[in-house]
Image (cartoon, helix red, strand yellow):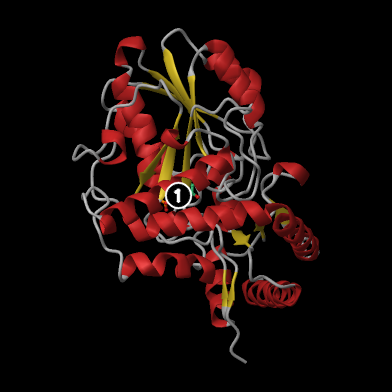
Amino acid sequence: MNRNIYMDYAATTFIKNEVLEEMMPYLKGFYGNPSSQYSIGFKSKMSIEFARDNISNAINCKSEEVFFTSGATEANNWAIKGFAHGNKERGNHIITTKIEHESLLSSCRYLEGNGFRVTYLSVDEEGLIDLEELKNSIEKDTIIVSIMFANNEIGTIQNIKEIGKICKGKGVVFHCDGVQAFGKVPIDVKELNIDMLSISSHKIYGPKGVGALYVKKGIKLHNLLHGGGQERSKRGGTENVASIVGFGKATEISFNNMKEDMERLTILRDEMIDNLLHIEGSFLNGGSGNNRLPNNINIAFPGINGEDLLFNLDRMGVCVSSGSACQATSMEPSHVLLALGLSKELAKASIRISIGDETTKEDMEYVCENIRNIVDRIRMVTE
Ligand SMILES: *Cc1c(COP(=O)(O)O)cnc(C)c1O
C-alpha cells in the first residue's frame, strides 16, 4: 500500500489550482515589465495592484501600505533591520521573544553586533509571553517590539491585541511576524495596533518566493534592497508578477473560506491530539484551546527519538516534521521547545504535525495508528 499523506502544512503548502490558473497568463503571454510604458506592461502593473488590494482588504490597511517581498524572511529582515537603521537617533533597544522564527532571531543577532541591544522575552510552558514582563522591558531607548502572531512549531497564538495596546501606550513600534496566523486567524492591523506585519504566500497555498510587509503610513524604514523605483522606491527589483498574482488569489481564497476551513481543521486537530495522547507518556507542547492554531499539533513521546519516528513515518508515506523545516538538518533541539522549559531529550522526542486543506479524517486515523505502532516498536527494542 503506497500512501502519500502530507501533514507538514506549516512548512509549506501545495499551490491551489485556482491560484495556478490565475498565475499562468503571467508566466506565458503577459510578460511585460510592470514599469514599461505600453499595454502589456500596464497589464502586469494592474495585476500587481489588484493583488495588493486583495492583501490590504484582508488585513484592513491601505493598499499603499503593502510592499511585496521575496517572502517572509525578507519581510522580517527588512522590518527589523530597516527600522533599526532608520531610527537609530531615537534609541538602540529592541524587544523580541525567544521563540521567533530564525529569520527574525538572526536579524536581531546581526543588529546586536552592530550597536543595538536586544531583549529576548521568555515564554511560559504554553509559549505565551508575560505581558507584565513586556511592559517592564520597554525602556526609554526602546524603539521596536517584534513578537510573532502565532508560532510555527507549537502553534501558540499570542495575545496580540494586548501587546499592540502596550506598544501603542508606550509609543514604540510593534512589528509582528504574521506568517502562520495569516489566513487562519482574522488579522485587523488597525484594531490590533500592528505597525508592521510580515506575511508569506507559500504557507497559504500560494507560490514560494513571494511575501509582503505591511508598513503603516508614517513609519520610517530604511531600504533593505536599493534599486529602481519599484514598490514606491522602497524595494527595488523587477516584480515577481506571476507569483504576486498567485499570492493575491491565495489570500482571497483563504480569507473567503477561513471560518469553515478552520472549524473543520479544529475538529480534526482535537481528535488527533486526543488520539495521540492515549499513547503512554505522551504530552502536548504549546498552547491550549483558543491559544492554538487550528492546524497545529506538537507532541512529545518520551523515550523516542523524533528523527527515528519521522524516518519510520516517511516509509509509511507520511510527512511530518521535527521542529521547524529550517532546522530539520541541524540536529539541534528546537529553540522553541527549549524555551518552553523542555529538556534536550524531550525536545528531541517531539514532533510537529500540521494539517490542512487535503487532510481527511481517514488520513488522521492512519497517521495516529502508525505513530502508535512505531512508538511501540521503538520502545520495545530500546527497553
Ligand atoms: C515560514 C515562516 C517564515 C519564513 O517565510 P518564507 O516566506 O519562507 O521566507 C517566517 N516566519 C514564520 C513564522 C514562518 O512560519
Residue at 38% across, 46% down: 73
Residue at 26% across, 41% down: 230
Q: Which residue was labeled with disc 1?
A: 50
Residue situated in front as seen by the camera: 103 or 266: 266
Q: Quadrant of residue 194?
A: top right
Residue situated in front as seen by the camera: 24 or 350: 24
Work out whether residue 330 can be spotted: no
Q: Residue 30, relative to residue 3: is it above or below?
A: above
> Residue 351's spot in the image, x, y percent?
60, 60
Q: Amino acid at mark 1?
A: Phe
In this rendering, would 74 be left or right of 343? left
Residue at 57% across, 67% down: 320
Work out whether residue 192 can be spotted: yes
**Ligand 1 is within 8 Å of the C-beta of the residue at disc 1:** no
In this rendering, would 205 be left or right of 380? left
> Residue 78's spot in the image, x, y percent?
34, 35
In this rendering, would 368 be left or right of 53? right
Residue situated in front as seen by the camera: 363 or 351: 363
> Residue 3's spot in the image, x, y percent?
60, 84
Q: Residue 174, relative to residue 253: is it above or below?
A: above
Residue situated in front as seen by the camera: 110 or 281: 110
> Residue 299's spot in the image, x, y percent?
67, 57
Residue at 51% across, 57% down: 249
Q: Residue 274, relative to residue 112: is it above or below?
A: below
Q: Bin the neighbour count of mark 1 within 10 Å (Cα to Cα): few under 14, some 14-19, many 20 and up.
A: some
Q: Residue 146, relative to residue 262: is it above or below?
A: above
Q: Quadrant of residue 81?
A: top left
Mark 1: secondary structure: helix
Quadrant the N terminus occupies = bottom right
